[in-house]
Amino acid sequence: MSTLVLILITGVGLGALYFLVASGLSLIYGLMHVLNFAHGAFLTLSAFIGWQVAQALGTASWGSFLASVLAGALVGAVFATATELALIRPLYERHIEQVLITVGLSFAAIALFEGIWGTDAVNIAGPAWLKQTTAVLGASIPNIYWLLMLAAGLVLAAIVLFLKKTRYGMIIRAGVENRSMVTALGIDVRRSFTIVFAIGGAAAGIGGVLAMHWYTFVSAHMGSTLLIFAFIVTVIGGLGSLTGAAIASVLVAVLQQFANFYLGGTGDFIVVALLAVVLLVRPTGILGRKA
Amino acid sequence: MTLTTGVPTLVPGRKGAYLPFAIGGALVLMMAVLPLLNIRIPGILPGATYTPGTLALLSLCMVFAAIALSYNMLLGTAGMLSFGHALYFGAGAYGLGIALTYLGVPLWPGALIALVGGLLIALLTGSVAMRVSGIPFAMVTLAFAQAGSVLVRRNQQVTGGEEGMRLPVAQVPEWLVGVVNTRNLYWLTLVVLVVVYLVALWVDRSRLGHLAEAVRENDARVRVLGLQPYAAKLIVFVVAGGCATLAGIMYMLLQSGTQPSAVGTELTITVLVMVVLGGVGFRWGAIVGGVLYTILDQRLTVLARSEWIHDLPAVLRIPLSEPLFLLGVLFILVVMFLPGGIAGTIDGWVRRRRGERTRTQLRQLDDAEGTGEETIAEVRT
């Protein structure tokens, strides 16, 4: 019983991490039809900057932890906005070239990170509470998972509020639905592209700093590994659907944890197999609309 | 609207129609006699052309040219953006290693087993991935390649894990082993490259290739004509996978070993960079891209170790000592300002002089994607 609870809760926690990365990807794809390979680079840079901030302020305190998360979100948002303005915007409506640009950016960024922070993983020590566990129904849950869930919950709530309650959110939702109609009504959709990139970058930045604490280290390739799972999650959830991404994140991560425990570490394969099954049965994903 | 596509077509009777083939034949001949000559190109090649070091580098160039050619079949001919092409390259490399080590067969049957294995994996993954197209297809192929990469890294007792796998030299014919025989390996690599080129040529010229091109331009229209887009694309995918497997087998022989990076996403991205650099949709562009990338990578690594780089301030030293950073920046610049790549730019220039109109292949892919969406929208309303 306690094992079951442990796997379930850590699965949901891991799903929260996937969601932090996938939410931005899904929004960006939904609105702009760009598969953003540079998302991993946003995440890794945020983690490294978060690490620098935490080192400067002393790693053990909650204040420095919060500061590093905020710095991560800010760095992610700034990096993403700069990418959108400098590289994506000039190639307006040329999706394949936009994808290639993000591939090139991620390629160059990883090499640069290796040059700056070295090829070896950099260890991080967080507040002592993160190392401890909390007992739930007899299972000892590492505390980082609660933090991941809290962060993902807050980010989800913030994005949903933004999309439902603000004017820009409304434009973004309308743009995902039918972009040419929004443009025909005289609204400049391109500004919302930048906003979507900034939101996605900030979410990835938070995800990056938390992922660093989850792994307890940060390396230049951290983003690429998480990015692949985020891709899988967005395809399974249905491209462009935020709710779909949230459901799929939890589904994928819980399944992965179960398979890792009961089927001898085959979690990654089960996830890819799930992807294959979803594609065969329902190519549009769980909540996807069109093929 | 009739526009010339990027793929050059043979028009019998036109002046100079057979010129590319004459040049190609002459180039192959020149490459074949290169190990017997003493040519030095300082700054590009590490030594004279008969030295094993230079021959090894040139062989590596040709292996990458071969995989770039196979990738061009996907992206250029069929318009499929795949992020899992390294899976088939890795299947060739690891397949050969596994066949020789665990089945104890000699080299040639082992290579055949690896090739069949690569084709089967391509068929299996391709048929599932092609349930979706466009960007989702790219994501799914990426996921499959990642599964392959995890498989290789996890099963340490079979594949050697992170350490990589050594080629059991005992089962390889003597004339292909050792530094002394580098030029035999070089000639074998040249044969592989020529075979892959001929396969690519056949695909582009055959009805299959024409159908794949038609699907790339307008999928719905091909369906309306009663043809099977799925089958055509799948065959091209499997053929391209087979060619990549061949390149992987050759890579294993050449390096007498392989690392898990041969299956990873980084390799696919590297090949994508080569093809875009050379020019999407051009067979010779893919070869130029593969060779150029490999030599640049090698030269920039040498540059990174040079004295004067170490004396620079950190702001300049760190970017300049990362070859992949420089290549990534070069790639971004090419996509932004030279979308036809090397071959596309030259071809466009030649065609404009002849008075023809052109567009780069990447532009065409984007437009084709656009028409597909419009057609769907029309059907719906």
Image (cartoon, coloured by chain):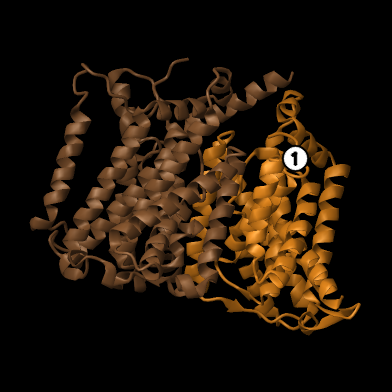
Chain colours: A orange, B brown
What's the amino acid at mark 1? Answer: Gly
Relative to B356, does residue A114 appear above or below in the rendering?
Answer: below
Relative to B356, does residue B102 appear above or below in the rendering?
Answer: below
- Residue B222 visible here: yes
Quarter of the image for residue B253 reads bottom left
Q: Position of residue B199 (x, y in %)?
A: 33, 39
Residue at the farthest right position: A137
Q: Position of residue B18 (x, y in %)?
A: 20, 26
Q: Nearer the viewer, residue A230 or B73?
A: B73
Q: Is residue A135 left or right of A69 when viewed as pictured?
A: right
Q: For the image shown, how many numbered marks are present on the structure?
A: 1
Identify the chain of the residue marked 1, using the numbered disc in the image: A
Q: Position of residue A290 (x, y in %)?
A: 72, 34
Q: Is residue B37 left or right of A184 when viewed as pictured?
A: left
Relative to A198, does residue B343 appear above or below in the rendering?
Answer: above
The local crowd at label 1, few if under 14, some if 14 to 19, many if 20 or more residues have their Cα within 10 Å, is some
Q: Is residue B170 left or right of A165 when viewed as pictured?
A: left
Quarter of the image for residue B19 reads top left
Q: Nearer the viewer, residue A264 or B292?
A: A264
Residue at 45% x, 73% y is B160
Q: Is residue A43 left or right of A143 when viewed as pictured?
A: left
- Residue A196 visible here: no
Quarter holding the C terminus of chain B? top right
Q: Position of residue B379 (x, y in %)?
A: 69, 19
- Residue placed under numbered mark 1 in the picture: A288
What kind of element bears circle 1?
A: loop
Residue at 68% x, 36% y is A190
Residue at 31% x, 68% y is B256
